[in-house]
Image: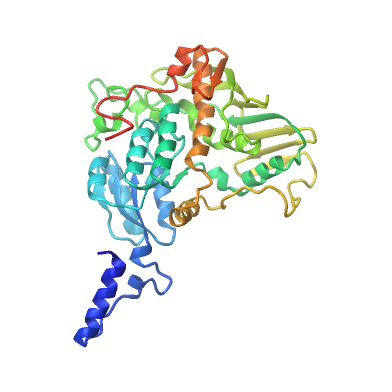
């Protein structure tokens, strides 16, 4: 029996007995509240750092109720649970293993801030279970896993919003509209700057050091190849080791790389070639400190991605536009303030990335950062890493989804998952 049927029948029963049935206004959705039957029942999975922030932002949206939280680190679980209570909601149920959550909970949606190496397997499991997902960028650890997520979204009729929040930020949207509407003239050069990896490497582990007792480390490694615990490649710092992440390249292309591709109309297209170079970090990290690579699309359009600066630079026949987090610079006087007119191309979506997800879960509309867009944005990073690590100019066959005559580079588009994990089942 659903909530609506229960309320209706208990109300009728009260009348039949001659006694009034008192139902709280909140149960009926009065006094600016949302009735339980219309609330978005949300679970949070992978809640340290960005994941916890995402859940807290969704908690602020009207009608969102967090019913359960899940993390391999029980310290993170407590922090996440406490934040739900501080938001005025009942304490959520807690799980250290997402398989138990899936077995016991029936949520409408999930917010997930997992390390990259878990995106593919866990996202596909959630989607098969009929759960809408707000998932963090990059879409997946590998190209193949990203495609699996795209296919699972489509096959199960789910809503997917990626944490590519710059798509919902005013100045980035304005920049995209300026470029798309030809206000800079023909685009001659595009650069996406993602900054240098100058993060400090933590201290080496002590001899025989074990994972924290609060952590299920085997589950954390999950589908990746087994590695003994090393705090230098654990919480946050996992992203700088190729067993778990894709370095600064994969961490940032879904922001500035995505905005660049979106503005030039290449956010639904794979490049046909890529070449570049990079400088590796010191061990145990094995991704790049600096890099500079260029993707070429079928029509000859090029997109350069480098670590020299932070933001996106567009150079057109009429002038230049530089947009970054919190600001912008345009060489054409008055262009930034110009009204583009009622017939101009406009960015879809809204300027509230989290509300966009909530609204789309209810309306079933495709979000601004849907899985397909995220797959193409993440591919900018997959292709860049393949070119930098091999040191070769690579040609990509989008129909076959492989690099031409380069088995090594093609092999970087997928990986063998550690048993028993797979993209098809858990």
Answer left or right for 67 relative to 180: left
Residue 193 against residue 283 in the figure, above or below: below
Q: Position of residue 65 (x, y in %)?
A: 35, 58
Q: Residue at x 69, y 41 (%)?
A: 180
Q: Quadrant of the C terminus?
A: top left
Residue at image x 54%, y 28%?
A: 380
Asked whether 344 or 292 is in front, the reply is: 344
* Residue at the image position 40 percent from the left and 56 percent from the top: 59
View extreme (left): residue: 17
Residue 81 visible to an observer of this rendering: yes
Q: How many marks?
A: 0
Q: Quadrant of residue 263?
A: top right
- Front-most of residues 367 and 283: 367
Q: Which quarter of the figure is the N terminus placed in?
A: bottom left
Identify the residue shown where x is 68% and y is 47%.
Answer: 345
Q: Where residue 372 sits in the image (x, y, percent)? A: 50, 38
Could you say which is closer to the camera, residue 368 or residue 15? 15
**How far across and how far down the image is residue 340, in percent?**
74, 50
Name the one closer to the observer, 372 or 168.
372
Instruction: Give the side of residue 131 with respect to residue 382, left or right.
Output: left
Q: Position of residue 368 (x, y in %)?
A: 53, 46
Residue farthest to the bottom?
Answer: 18
| Res. 28 image quadrant | bottom left
Q: Quick check: can you spot residue 47?
A: no
Instruction: Tell me if 200 is positioned left or right of 263 in this view.
Output: left
Colouring of the image: rainbow
């Amino acid at each position: 029996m659903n909530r609506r049927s229960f309320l209706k029948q208990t109300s009728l029963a009260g009348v039949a007995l001659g006694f009034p049935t008192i139902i709280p206004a909140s149960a009926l959705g009065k006094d600016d509240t949302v009735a339980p039957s219309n609330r978005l029942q949300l679970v949070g999975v992978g809640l340290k750092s960005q994941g916890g922030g995402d859940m807290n932002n969704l908690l602020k949206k009207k009608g969102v109720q967090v019913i359960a939280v899940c993390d391999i680190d029980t310290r993170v679980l407590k922090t996440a649970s406490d934040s739900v209570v501080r938001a005025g909601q009942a304490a959520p149920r807690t799980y250290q293993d997402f398989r138990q959550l899936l077995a016991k909970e029936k949520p409408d949606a999930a917010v997930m801030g997992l390390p990259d190496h878990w995106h593919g397997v866990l996202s596909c499991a959630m989607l098969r279970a009929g759960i809408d997902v707000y998932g963090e960028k990059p879409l997946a650890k590998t190209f193949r896993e990203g495609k699996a997520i795209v296919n699972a979204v489509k096959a199960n009729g789910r809503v997917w919003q990626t944490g590519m929040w710059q798509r919902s930020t005013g100045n980035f949207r304005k920049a995209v509209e300026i470029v798309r509407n030809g206000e800079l003239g023909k685009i001659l050069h595009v650069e996406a700057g993602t900054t240098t990896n100058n993060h400090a490497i933590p201290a080496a582990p002590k001899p025989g050091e074990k994972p924290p007792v609060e952590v299920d480390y085997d589950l954390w490694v999950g589908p990746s190849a087994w590695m003994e615990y090393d705090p230098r490649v654990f919480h946050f710092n996992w992203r700088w080791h190729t067993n778990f992440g894709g370095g600064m390249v994969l961490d940032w292309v879904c922001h500035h790389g995505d905005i660049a591709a979106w503005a030039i109309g290449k956010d639904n297209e794979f490049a046909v070639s890529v070449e570049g170079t990079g400088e590796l970090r010191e061990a145990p990290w094995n991704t790049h400190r600096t890099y500079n690579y260029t993707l070429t699309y079928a029509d000859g359009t090029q997109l350069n991605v480098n670590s020299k600066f932070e933001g996106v630079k567009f150079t057109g026949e009429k002038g230049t536009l530089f947009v970054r987090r919190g600001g912008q610079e345009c060489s054409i006087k008055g262009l930034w303030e110009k009204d583009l007119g009622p017939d101009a191309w406009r960015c879809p979506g809204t300027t509230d990335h989290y509300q966009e997800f909530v609204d789309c879960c209810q309306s079933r509309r495709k979000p601004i950062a849907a899985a397909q867009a995220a797959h193409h944005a993440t591919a900018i990073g997959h292709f860049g890493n393949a070119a930098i690590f091999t040191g070769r100019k690579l040609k990509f066959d989008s129909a076959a989804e492989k690099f031409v005559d380069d088995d090594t580079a093609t092999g970087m588009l997928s990986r063998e998952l550690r048993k028993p994990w797979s993209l098809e089942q858990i």
